[in-house]
Image: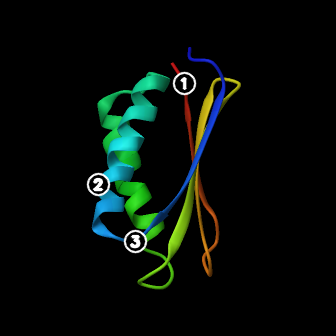
Amino acid sequence: MPSDFLFAIEVSDEPASDRMLTDLTAAVSAHAGLAQGTVDELNDALRQARACGPEQGRCQVRFQAASGTLTISVGREGCPEWQTTRPLP
């Protein structure tokens, strides 16, 4: 099991940000030991969470591993915070 960590980033809604966030989610998930199927599922969920709110804007994405769990959250102005958790292997 990886050590506890916190990684947070603020991204814009540009297409390049979507590609970067997909790569980042894959890297963080691999570091945490999650399976590729879980990574694909998380990327789909993150895209949906970022689709809330105005077409242009910024959102904050946070990855936190603690106590055997990976928590991912997305905050965006005008939208309820989205969050999901996955147990770490």
In space, the residues marked 3 and 2 are separated at their CA atoms by: 11 Å
Asked if residue 7 lies left or right of residue 26, the reply is right
Label 2 residue SS: helix
State the residue position of label 1. Answer: 88
Q: Residue at x 43, y 32 (%)?
A: 29
Where's residue 15, x and y in %? 28, 67
- Outermost bottom residue: 54
Where's residue 18, x and y in %? 33, 60
Residue 26 position by quadrant: top left
In space, the residues marked 2 and 1 are separated at their CA atoms by: 24 Å
Residues 67 and 76: in front is: 76
Where's residue 7, x and y in %? 59, 40
State the residue position of label 3. Answer: 13
Label located before the other in sequence (2 or 1):
2
Q: Quadrant of the N terminus?
A: top right
Q: Amino acid at mark 1?
A: Leu
Q: Amino acid at mark 2?
A: Arg
Q: Amino acid at mark 3?
A: Asp
Q: Residue at x 64, y 30 (%)?
A: 5
